[in-house]
Image: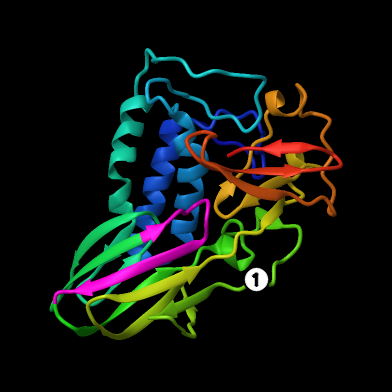
Amino acid sequence: EGFTVDYALGNNSYCETCASLAFAKWNHRMFLLTGDGRYLDTMEKSMHNNVLSGLSLSGDRFFYPNKLESSGDTRPDWYTCACCPPHLANYVMSIGGYAYAHNDQALYVNLYMNGNAQIPLASNTVNLSVDTNYPWDGDIEITVTPTQAGSFPIYLRIPGWARNTPMPGNLYGYVNDSNEQVTIQVNGSPVEYDIVKGFAKMERVWNSGDTIVIVLPMPVRKVVAHPYVTADVGLVAIQRGPIVYCAEGIDNGGSVYDLIVNDELEFSATYEPGTLNGVVVLRSTSPTIELVP
């Protein structure tokens, strides 16, 4: 709730939950204004890594601050200044409304999540059914069911993190580029696509039951900050898909301040349904490090 000089981004800043929610909502509004998927990249990163950390899995304890680095803070059950808990509850219940957008002629898939949507166009109504385990898995299947067969474009967001850009701008970058490519199939056949403003445009005559399969590769990536961010000099973040991972002392021998991650260190990714209600955990050996979302 304050401003200072450029690049003054300390890791113990409190990253208030309400501010994170406002940031996500502002980026969504900027997308609606411009049609630029970069704003959705920022919204998604904020949503998965900052907003949701403000709420416990039990749903009854909350963080006002969401520090990147702490010495073991715990969530209280309420705040005297109770702006964050209801704001967060409202946002969680409305997330489905951020997943899609449309105008009279086209529809946009902004976020990938299980569910169904009915989207009105000027001359058609389109039902979408999405089957995915995103953000833990990059395989997404979308079934398209228009009220009547017709030609219209579907814009599929191709996240910046899948195109060697962890965040819009030059504040953060991957240590190394990945050569893995995003693939798209329609009815089982690969299709070529161009990316315009962060979206792949799929325009054709759509029939009931047509399927789109998107594969977003999710290698484990190392992220570094701009050198002007002095608080992050010599530090690295670990990201997989849209998720930035956390090293907790309790999982790593009591302390994480002496962990060393070099360019050669590799992490394995394992989906563990019994951990935090089902998440992908990252592990390395030599040294042994365990990371959670």
Q: Quadrant of the C terminus?
A: top right
Image position of 186 with respect to 270: above or below: below
For mark 1, give the secondary structure: loop
The picture quadrant where one finds residue 132 is bottom left
At x 47% / y 35%, what residue is drawn?
277
At x 69% / y 72%, what residue is drawn?
179
Disc 1 marks a residue whose amino acid type is Glu
At x 37% / y 12%, what residue is drawn?
80
Residue extending farthest to the top is 80
Q: Which residues are magenta?
A: 131-147
Image position of 245 with respect to 121: above or below: above
- Say whether residue 21 is left or right of residue 164: left
Residue located beneath label 1 in the image: 180
- Depth check: 177 or 254 in front? 254
- Say whether residue 260 is left or right of residue 146: right
- Depth check: 220 or 34 in front? 220
The picture quadrant where one finds residue 162 is bottom right
Residue 161 percent location from the top left of the image: 58, 60
